Amino acid sequence: MKRAQSAVLTALAAGGLLAPLACHATEGALGRPVTGTSVSPNVAVIPSEPVWIANLQQLYMDGSVSGGREVPIAGKTSIGLDAKVAFTLATLMKVWDTGGGAWNFASSFTLPYVWMSVHTTAGIGNFSRGTSDRASNLYDMYFSPIIAGYHFSKTSHMALSFNVWAPTGQYDKSALANPSLNNWTFVPQIAFTHLMPEYGLEFNAVGAFQFYTRNTATDYQNAPLFTLDVMGVKKFGKWGAGIVMGTVQQLGNDSGPIADRLNGFRGRDFAMGPIVTYDTKLGGKAPLSLSLRWVPTVASKNRLDSTATVMGSATLVF
């Protein structure tokens, strides 16, 4: 149970999502990833025991795209975009009974709920000036059929996973705020964890590629994305404090009638901020890990710029 006690949801690469508010080299100015939210303490540690892991995340983001930039959204374009988004994500992971060897395997499923408010400052085409919209519903489902964890040693770990976003959320082509991206997204991911218990230090990193299918309703094809989040934490007994850094880089240009007119709408961003963690046991038995982070945008292009990206997380092993 040693590894299980410190395990944190490897599968929750869901730290970064977002519906039609993507202007970062993706339709709506964000795509799936929210920079700085996919990495967690012990992110690459898959328990060697057959346990269940439950995770609940609350993510809030308040961002904008300004400077007279055109943003593709709802099959049209807008000059300027303001968006507030709140995600609630419930994840359940099953660690399979594969013995105590170097390899361990797991699978997971995430049910997300989203609330969002979108405001366009100036419209082009069929948008009227100052158009606003809100939506609140279940978001696209996220699942990880296979997560393979490898233990190099007691202090160094790696996890490989293949993750999928399914377009299960409600989608309306004419709406500004949609609880779906209306596409499939495939996410191969690798995570690393290195522990230095003699110094109370922990380092984690998560890298992934995101491949999107075409949004058939708007004929918009998002280009692949590369995401990288890293974290360093210093432990003080049950408490921990550290820093999180992350970036999203678009690999190529978006395509489609609107994307072509916007020269591919290629984007990127970088975010950095603090994290606080707390580890305890529920009822003196079940390991419980809590964390709170703030990861404001430091630099961005064609992507929502947010100084209010906050995420809280609770993980229970049983």
Image (spheres, rainbow, N blue to C red):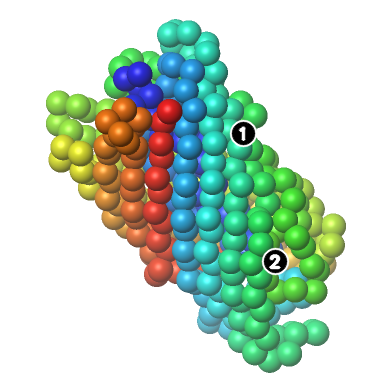
* Depth check, front residue: 77 or 294: 294
The vertical placement of 126 against 285, above or below, is below
The vertical placement of 292 against 157, above or below, is below
Q: Is residue 23 left or right of residue 314?
A: right
Residue 256's x, y, as percent? 80, 62
- Which residue corresponds to the image point at 61% horizontal and 86% vertical from the top-left? 121
- Which residue corresponds to the image point at 32% horizontal and 36% vertical from the top-left? 282
Residue 3's x, y, as percent? 35, 22
- Which residue corresponds to the image point at 79% horizontal and 57% vertical from the top-left? 215
- Which residue corresponds to the image point at 56% horizontal and 78% vertical from the top-left? 82
Residue 211's x, y, as percent? 68, 44
Q: In this view, does 41 lie to the left or right of 96?
A: left
Q: How crowded is mark 2: few (under 14 residues within 10 Å), some or many (20 or more)?
A: many
- Amino acid type shown at disc 2: Asn
Residue 32's x, y, as percent? 60, 53
Q: Residues within 10 Å of mark 1 (few under 14, many from 20)?
A: many
The residue singled out by tag 1 in the image is: 144
